[in-house]
Amino acid sequence: MNQPAHTEPLSSQLSRHMVREMRSDHAGETGAVYIYQGITAVARWRQDAELLAFAKEHGDTEAEHLRLLEAWLPAYRPSRLLVPWCIAGWLTGALPALFGRRAVYGTIAAVETFVDVHYQQQIEHLQVNGGPEGLLPLLQRCQADEQHHRDEAASLAGPQKTWLLRLWCGLVGSGSAAAVVLARRV
Protein backbone atom coordinates (compact mmCIF):
# COMPACT_ATOMS: atom_id res chain seq x y z
CA MET A 1 0.00 0.00 0.00
CA ASN A 2 1.43 3.37 -0.92
CA GLN A 3 1.91 5.59 2.08
CA PRO A 4 2.39 9.35 1.79
CA ALA A 5 6.06 10.40 1.60
CA HIS A 6 5.88 12.91 4.48
CA THR A 7 6.98 12.39 8.07
CA GLU A 8 4.04 13.80 10.05
CA PRO A 9 1.66 11.18 11.49
CA LEU A 10 -1.04 10.11 9.04
CA SER A 11 -3.70 10.71 11.66
CA SER A 12 -2.83 14.42 11.88
CA GLN A 13 -4.14 14.84 8.33
CA LEU A 14 -7.65 13.58 9.11
CA SER A 15 -10.69 15.77 9.60
CA ARG A 16 -12.70 15.26 12.78
CA HIS A 17 -15.29 13.42 10.70
CA MET A 18 -12.70 11.03 9.29
CA VAL A 19 -11.14 10.43 12.72
CA ARG A 20 -14.56 9.19 13.86
CA GLU A 21 -14.90 7.09 10.73
CA MET A 22 -11.43 5.59 11.13
CA ARG A 23 -12.26 4.79 14.76
CA SER A 24 -15.35 2.88 13.56
CA ASP A 25 -13.28 1.12 10.86
CA HIS A 26 -10.66 0.16 13.43
CA ALA A 27 -13.30 -1.21 15.79
CA GLY A 28 -14.96 -3.06 12.92
CA GLU A 29 -11.77 -4.64 11.66
CA THR A 30 -10.87 -5.60 15.24
CA GLY A 31 -14.27 -7.26 15.54
CA ALA A 32 -13.74 -8.98 12.19
CA VAL A 33 -10.43 -10.46 13.31
CA TYR A 34 -12.25 -11.89 16.33
CA ILE A 35 -15.13 -13.21 14.20
CA TYR A 36 -12.64 -15.39 12.38
CA GLN A 37 -10.97 -16.40 15.64
CA GLY A 38 -14.37 -17.56 16.91
CA ILE A 39 -14.98 -19.52 13.71
CA THR A 40 -11.49 -21.02 13.97
CA ALA A 41 -12.02 -22.15 17.57
CA VAL A 42 -15.22 -24.01 16.74
CA ALA A 43 -13.91 -25.35 13.42
CA ARG A 44 -10.88 -26.82 15.22
CA TRP A 45 -13.15 -28.39 17.83
CA ARG A 46 -15.34 -29.83 15.06
CA GLN A 47 -12.26 -30.75 12.98
CA ASP A 48 -13.75 -28.95 9.97
CA ALA A 49 -10.83 -28.39 7.60
CA GLU A 50 -12.92 -26.49 5.03
CA LEU A 51 -14.15 -23.99 7.60
CA LEU A 52 -10.65 -23.66 9.06
CA ALA A 53 -9.25 -22.79 5.63
CA PHE A 54 -12.05 -20.26 5.05
CA ALA A 55 -11.45 -18.63 8.45
CA LYS A 56 -7.67 -18.49 7.95
CA GLU A 57 -7.86 -16.89 4.52
CA HIS A 58 -10.45 -14.31 5.50
CA GLY A 59 -8.96 -13.73 8.95
CA ASP A 60 -5.56 -12.97 7.45
CA THR A 61 -7.14 -10.35 5.18
CA GLU A 62 -8.96 -8.74 8.12
CA ALA A 63 -5.74 -8.68 10.17
CA GLU A 64 -4.00 -6.90 7.28
CA HIS A 65 -6.84 -4.35 7.10
CA LEU A 66 -6.50 -3.76 10.82
CA ARG A 67 -2.75 -3.21 10.52
CA LEU A 68 -3.21 -0.74 7.65
CA LEU A 69 -5.97 1.19 9.42
CA GLU A 70 -3.95 1.47 12.63
CA ALA A 71 -1.45 3.63 10.73
CA TRP A 72 -4.24 6.15 10.16
CA LEU A 73 -5.93 6.14 13.55
CA PRO A 74 -4.58 8.49 16.17
CA ALA A 75 -3.02 6.33 18.88
CA TYR A 76 -5.05 8.13 21.51
CA ARG A 77 -8.36 7.81 19.67
CA PRO A 78 -9.35 4.13 19.32
CA SER A 79 -12.80 3.14 20.50
CA ARG A 80 -12.88 2.62 24.23
CA LEU A 81 -15.15 -0.35 23.59
CA LEU A 82 -12.54 -2.58 21.93
CA VAL A 83 -12.93 -5.33 24.55
CA PRO A 84 -16.70 -5.63 23.95
CA TRP A 85 -16.06 -5.55 20.17
CA CYS A 86 -13.64 -8.45 20.56
CA ILE A 87 -16.13 -10.47 22.59
CA ALA A 88 -19.01 -9.66 20.25
CA GLY A 89 -16.85 -10.51 17.23
CA TRP A 90 -15.74 -13.83 18.68
CA LEU A 91 -19.34 -14.78 19.50
CA THR A 92 -20.51 -13.64 16.04
CA GLY A 93 -18.09 -16.17 14.57
CA ALA A 94 -18.35 -18.99 17.10
CA LEU A 95 -22.13 -19.19 17.50
CA PRO A 96 -22.98 -19.78 13.84
CA ALA A 97 -20.01 -22.16 13.55
CA LEU A 98 -21.76 -24.36 16.11
CA PHE A 99 -24.62 -24.69 13.60
CA GLY A 100 -22.42 -25.45 10.63
CA ARG A 101 -20.82 -23.94 7.55
CA ARG A 102 -23.98 -22.52 5.99
CA ALA A 103 -24.67 -20.54 9.15
CA VAL A 104 -21.11 -19.17 9.09
CA TYR A 105 -21.28 -18.28 5.42
CA GLY A 106 -24.67 -16.59 5.86
CA THR A 107 -23.30 -14.62 8.81
CA ILE A 108 -20.23 -13.47 6.90
CA ALA A 109 -22.37 -12.45 3.92
CA ALA A 110 -24.55 -10.37 6.27
CA VAL A 111 -21.60 -8.70 7.99
CA GLU A 112 -19.81 -7.94 4.74
CA THR A 113 -22.97 -6.55 3.14
CA PHE A 114 -23.06 -3.98 5.92
CA VAL A 115 -19.31 -3.31 5.73
CA ASP A 116 -19.48 -2.73 1.98
CA VAL A 117 -22.09 0.01 2.46
CA HIS A 118 -20.12 1.51 5.37
CA TYR A 119 -16.93 1.75 3.31
CA GLN A 120 -18.87 3.12 0.34
CA GLN A 121 -20.18 6.01 2.46
CA GLN A 122 -16.63 6.89 3.49
CA ILE A 123 -15.34 6.60 -0.07
CA GLU A 124 -18.07 8.92 -1.32
CA HIS A 125 -17.29 11.40 1.46
CA LEU A 126 -13.62 11.47 0.45
CA GLN A 127 -14.48 11.79 -3.24
CA VAL A 128 -16.63 14.84 -2.50
CA ASN A 129 -14.62 16.46 0.31
CA GLY A 130 -11.11 15.25 -0.40
CA GLY A 131 -8.77 13.79 2.15
CA PRO A 132 -5.20 12.88 2.82
CA GLU A 133 -3.20 11.20 0.10
CA GLY A 134 -3.43 7.43 0.32
CA LEU A 135 -6.61 7.13 2.37
CA LEU A 136 -9.07 6.78 -0.52
CA PRO A 137 -7.12 3.94 -2.19
CA LEU A 138 -6.82 2.20 1.18
CA LEU A 139 -10.57 2.31 1.77
CA GLN A 140 -11.24 1.18 -1.80
CA ARG A 141 -8.87 -1.76 -1.33
CA CYS A 142 -10.51 -2.75 1.95
CA GLN A 143 -13.96 -2.44 0.37
CA ALA A 144 -12.96 -4.64 -2.58
CA ASP A 145 -11.68 -7.32 -0.19
CA GLU A 146 -14.91 -7.15 1.84
CA GLN A 147 -17.00 -7.40 -1.34
CA HIS A 148 -15.03 -10.49 -2.31
CA HIS A 149 -15.64 -11.99 1.15
CA ARG A 150 -19.36 -11.17 0.90
CA ASP A 151 -19.73 -12.69 -2.55
CA GLU A 152 -17.78 -15.83 -1.70
CA ALA A 153 -19.69 -16.37 1.54
CA ALA A 154 -23.07 -15.75 -0.15
CA SER A 155 -22.21 -18.25 -2.85
CA LEU A 156 -21.17 -20.86 -0.28
CA ALA A 157 -24.27 -20.23 1.85
CA GLY A 158 -26.57 -20.98 -1.06
CA PRO A 159 -29.83 -19.29 -2.00
CA GLN A 160 -32.06 -20.78 0.70
CA LYS A 161 -31.80 -19.56 4.28
CA THR A 162 -33.85 -20.93 7.13
CA TRP A 163 -36.01 -18.47 9.05
CA LEU A 164 -33.60 -18.76 11.99
CA LEU A 165 -30.60 -17.87 9.83
CA ARG A 166 -32.49 -14.94 8.27
CA LEU A 167 -33.35 -13.70 11.77
CA TRP A 168 -29.73 -14.13 12.92
CA CYS A 169 -28.38 -12.32 9.85
CA GLY A 170 -30.80 -9.45 10.45
CA LEU A 171 -29.59 -9.23 14.04
CA VAL A 172 -25.96 -9.27 12.87
CA GLY A 173 -26.63 -6.45 10.38
CA SER A 174 -28.44 -4.34 13.00
CA GLY A 175 -25.71 -5.04 15.54
CA SER A 176 -23.04 -3.97 13.05
CA ALA A 177 -24.87 -0.69 12.42
CA ALA A 178 -25.23 -0.02 16.14
CA ALA A 179 -21.56 -0.85 16.72
CA VAL A 180 -20.50 1.74 14.12
CA VAL A 181 -22.56 4.45 15.79
CA LEU A 182 -21.04 3.62 19.17
CA ALA A 183 -17.48 3.31 17.88
CA ARG A 184 -17.68 6.75 16.28
CA ARG A 185 -18.55 8.28 19.64
CA VAL A 186 -17.01 6.12 22.36
Image: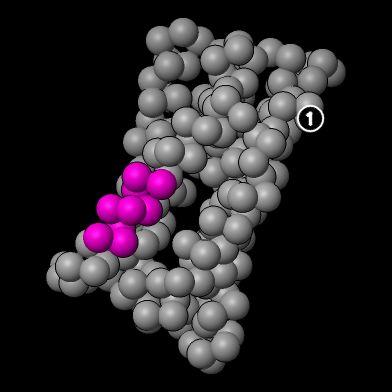
Residue at 44%, 80% (x, y): give it. 98
**Residue 139 image point, x, y percent:** 51, 33
The image shows residue 79, relative to residue 109, as above or below, that is above
> Who is closer to the viewer here, 76 or 124?
76
Residue 97 in the figure: left or right of residue 150: right
Q: What kind of colouring is applied to the model shown? A: one colour
Residue at 40%, 10% (x, y): give it. 128
Quarter containing the C terminus: top right
> Who is closer to the viewer here, 37 or 82?
82
User: Which quarter of the picture shows residue 143?
Assistant: top left
> Who is closer to the viewer here, 42 or 148?
42
- Amino acid type, mark 1: Ala
Quarter containing the N terminus: top right
Residue at 42%, 44% (x, y): give it. 176
Residue 108 in the figure: left or right of residue 11: left
Residue that carries the numbered disc 1 in the rendered image = 75
Magenta segment: 167-175
**Residue 79 image point, x, y percent:** 65, 35
**Residue 82 colored magenta?**
no
